[in-house]
Image: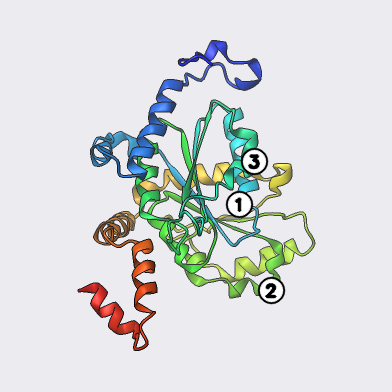
Amino acid sequence: MKENITREELPASRVKNKALDWDFNKMRSLSRAISLVENESEGWQQILRDIPAEAFDIPVIGITGPPGAGKSTLINALITQLTESGKSIGIVAVDPTSPFNYGSLLGDRVRMAGHFNNPQVFIRSLATRGSLGGLSAKTIEVVDVMRSGGFDYILIETVGVGQSEVEIAGLADCTIVVLVPEGGDDVQALKSGVMEIADIFVVNKSDRPGSAMFLQNLKKLLPHRDKYAHQPIPIIPVTATREEGISALIEAIDHQIALQADRPLKNQLLAEKAWQLISAHRMKDLSRIQLLESLRMAAQSPDFSFYRFLGDYLV
């Protein structure tokens, strides 16, 4: 394979929009920059400091929700419609961490296989690295590096684990919470923190029985007004497998992004983002593997005390 492949040399099936000026060398450079930042290799901090200010105008869309809600299918449908309209998309797929090597399980390689050869799409896997909220400090930094890629949108899919996933609100310009009709009357049992972060609610699989009742229950439980523009919070019914309702969802996303300038919580969200990064920096000298080994050795003592061990370890 040639080292520097040109757009003209690609098979026609891989070129969906010939007007799109996509630089494959730039894509490779972006991939390398992400790896340097993710692994904290030499020069990684300078990469972050050199991100141009205008790059932060690129909208970041966070997509979260309980497991099985169809987040990946929804993202596939969004990618299809956005790329058909000439948009370029960067995707960060936050996967569960392997318990053996603490790396990503690479589930997106299966979920988004149909888009890997699309020159308008850039997909990156990240491991949660033990973060309970579905995001890690490296997710924040990698997303900011991806902003310098010149994409029209950046999409983040989280692993969907519960209330602590409110972390995504500090990173995304628009947060989508995906639900399914199977929630039925039990929608009120959803963690309130997850419900409160949504800029848009998507009811996926809305062709299933009970979807109309679910939508009504959801409307009753949500705050009546949008926290930024004093408008009703959008609830978009979709059937992602058939790409139904996706156009309406894109319109709602663009509308929410347009409201950014009026958001009074922007600085508060930036402070939350800074908190996550500072906390990660302060804890970077702690190693799970070293902790496990130290604990294993200490536990062999007949008078082992967990809290005495913890106190000694923190000295």
x, y percent for residue 191: 53, 71
Mark 1–mark 3 distance (CA, rounded to whole Å): 10 Å
Q: Answer with the quarter of the image where residue 150 lies.
A: top left
Mark 2 Cα shell of 10 Å, populated few (<14), some (14-19), many (≥20): some
Q: Amino acid at mark 2?
A: Asp
Mark 3 Cα shell of 10 Å, populated few (<14), some (14-19), many (≥20): many
Question: Is residue 224 in view?
Answer: no
> Which residue is the site of mark 3?
77
Numbered circles on residues, count: 3
Mark 1 Cα shell of 10 Å, populated few (<14), some (14-19), many (≥20): many
> Of 179 and 227, which appears nearest the observer?
179
> Of 5 and 167, which appears nearest the observer?
5
> Of 123 and 165, which appears nearest the observer?
123
x, y percent for residue 121: 53, 32
Residue in the picture at 27% in, 34% down: 52
Q: Earlier in the sequence, mark 1 or mark 3?
A: 1
Q: Earlier in the sequence, mark 2 or mark 1?
A: 1
> Which residue is the site of mark 2?
185
Residue in the picture at 64% in, 41% down: 77
Question: Does 6 appear above or below 219?
Answer: above
Give the structural element (helix, strand or loop) at label 2.
helix
Give the structural element (helix, strand or loop) at label 1.
helix
Which label lies toward us, 2 or 1? Answer: 1
Mark 3–mark 2 distance (CA, rounded to whole Å): 28 Å
